[in-house]
Image (cartoon, rainbow, N blue to C red):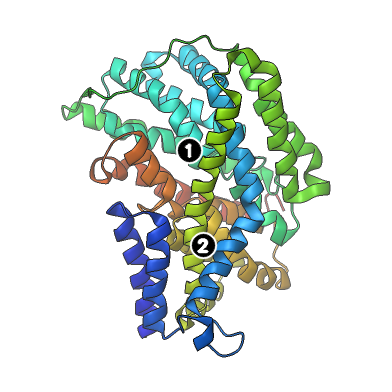
Amino acid sequence: MLSMIGLIGGLALLIYLTMKGMNLLVAGPLCALFVAVLSGLPLFPQLAPDGGANLVTNYMTGFSGFVASWYLMFLLGSIFGKVMEDSGAADSVSKWVVDKLGMKQAVLAVVAACAILTYGGVSLFVVAFSVYPMALSLFKQADLPRRFIPAALAFGSVTFTMTSAGSPEIQNWIPIEHLGTTPYAGWEVSLIVAVFMAVFGYWWLKRMITKAVSNGERFVARKNDPVVANKELPNPIVGLIPLLVVLIISFIFHDSLKQSALIIALLGGVIATYLLNRKYFTSFWNAVSDGTMGALVAIGNTAAVVGFGGVAKAVPAFQVAVDAMTSIPGSPLIGGAIAVSVIAGMTGSASGGQAIALPLLAPHYMDLGVNTEALHRTVAISSGALDSLPHNGYVVTTVRAICGESHKDAYGAVGIVTVVVPLIGLALAIALFSIGLGI
């Protein structure tokens, strides 16, 4: 009982401290300490039986294990995003989308620009930084409440694109290692669910904004608002080519190299961006340096919550919770979806949730004969739901650092489009797999 209180209390504390602005690299181990103390877990290896679980070993094993497995993907993904940004290629693509759709479709333009960049492999954080100035300009021209900008950015980035079949984002690639699948697993169901989430989520987002406008909310400018730069940009078609390079290379090598294909694909994207847009760079090597630092922060924040999960899964309450979720009557996909969703919610990270859950769940469900393609797609979609609770690193960065909003004003809409809509999409995916579609 005390262990369960520690587990739930540790998660609640992690969310609270994040909402208060504490760095995840501090909040993660601090909340892990809370879980360990209430569960009676030894704090140091010297105090534990030989090879037994303890706070320091379990936390650092989870932390370092995630870094070892995914550092190169984070590094190249961040560098790719930064060179796309520095060369103006990302701005060119998003500006082209905005120009084609126009001011009257301001919200759709922002969502579409984010979706194209995300599905092309650009880092979620870079997409938010890149599209935000144009989103701000569009919302200002359309006189729409700026508190909905984080929701528009997040909806286009971390929902129907991030977890869809073929996406180069790591949330679609982590299951490959554990299930022996491909990034295109369950693509038929994935396509239907992605279209549903895109249409339904956009309708709901527009409805919230329209209601706010009818209640008298308008755009309010601020002194420190960024301005879209007037520097010369590459042709948008040339800007799109590196995105296509990433998708094509990952498609060619996914069978032979599994998740390592993403390393080659992102490296190819970096090289293509440099070769095609050399004259537009402000500083290529500064972009590489900034991308490297960004990767360290991103993987550090994710690893910090994976470390928390490494401690959480060592306490008795965690196994009780996993047993309860995996023994849910009905389709095994339901138990798997709930388990991954809950763990992703605990860690505040879709990739972190998968990294913790799959080593435990994949052997269990594969022994039961569950279709691995269906499980892959279900896990991917489910990881992109509760992960977007308030303590999620992307949510904190986008709402506060990029958009300058408060959780109180902006998170309501963000939560609806990044938590509620994906949960409905997850239910649809399970239903479609249950009737045999895509299996």
* Residue 159 appears in the picture as rendered: no
Query: Looking at the picture, how far across and down is residue 294, in whole percent?
Result: 51, 41
**Quarter of the picture holding the N terminus:** bottom left
In the displayed structure, would residue 112 be above or below residue 421? above
Judging by the rendered image, the residue that carries numbered circle 2 is 306
Query: Looking at the picture, how far across and down is residue 343, in whole percent?
Result: 49, 64
* Residue 269 appears in the picture as rendered: yes
Label 2 crowd (10 A; few <14 / some 14-19 / many >=20): many
Q: In the visual, does 25 lie left or right of 217?
A: right
SS class, disc 2: helix
Q: Nearer the viewer, residue 435 or 46?
A: 46
Q: Residue at x 30, y 15 (%)?
A: 141
Query: Looking at the picture, how far across and down is residue 103, in whole percent?
Result: 38, 14
Q: Residue at x 67, y 50 (%)?
A: 437
Query: Looking at the picture, how far across and down is residue 15, in whole percent?
Result: 34, 59
Gap between marks 1 and 2, in whole Å?
19 Å
N-term mark: 1 or 2: 1
Residue 125 is labelled as 1
Report the number of numbered marks.
2
Q: Amino acid at mark 2?
A: Val
SS class, disc 1: helix
Residue 44 is labelled as none
Q: In the visual, does 383 lie left or right of 238?
A: left
In the displayed structure, would residue 243 be above or below residue 367? above
Q: Amino acid at mark 1?
A: Phe
Q: Nearer the viewer, residue 97 or 88?
A: 88
Q: In the visual, does 312 lie left or right of 244?
A: left
